Image (tube, rainbow, N blue to C red):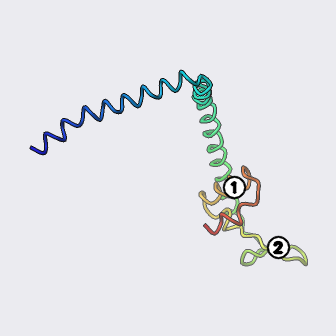
Amino acid sequence: GSSTGGVSQLPLLRLLRLLRLTRMVRLMRAVPELLTLIKGMAAATRSVMSTLILLIGLLYVFGIIFTQQLKDKECKWCDDHVCKAGETEISYPLKEYWGSMSRSMFSLFVCGTLLDDMMTITLPI
C-alpha cells in the first residue's frame, strides 16, 4: 500500500521540475541581457579551460625543475635553512617551499600568480 504512494509521486515531481524549467525560460525571455551573459560565459569557458591547462602544465614543468635543483645541489653555506652569505644570515626555508613536487607547484602558484606574499598565510595551512 505505502510503496505505491511513492511511485505515484514520481510523475508529480517530474512535472514540478518541468514547471521550474519553463519558469527559467520565461525569465530568459523577459531579461534578454541575462541570456547574452550566459551565452558569453559559455563561449569563454573554452578559453579559460585552455589557459588553466597551460598554467597547470607550466607549474608542473617548473615544479620539477625547482625540486630537482634543490635535491641535486647541497648548499655549502647553508646550515638548518639559515644561509650565511658573508656576515649576514638570511632565513630561507628552501625545503618548505621546494621540498616536494606538490610544495614546489603550490609555491610557484602562490608566489607567481597571486603575487601578494601569501606564503606567510598559506604555509601553516
Q: Quadrant of the N terminus?
A: top left
Rendered view: 25 above or below 93: above
> Would you name the residue on which mark 2 appears?
90
Badge 2 crowding class, 10 Å Cα cut-off, few under 14, some 14 to 19, many 20 or more, is: few
What amino acid type is highlighted by mark number 2? Answer: Ile
Q: Is residue 6 above or below residue 36?
A: below
Kind of element beneath mark 1: helix
Q: Going by the image, does 41 lie left or right of 73? A: left
Mark 1 vs mark 2: in front = 1
Residue 109 or residue 10, whichever sits in front: 10
| The furthest residue to the right | 87
Residue at the image position 66 percent from the left and 67 percent from the top = 96
Quadrant showing the C terminus? bottom right
Q: Residue at x 72, y 70 (%)?
A: 93
Q: Residue at x 47, y 28 (%)?
A: 24
Crowding near the residue tagged with mark 1, few <14, some 14–19, many ≥20 C-alpha atoms within 10 Å? some
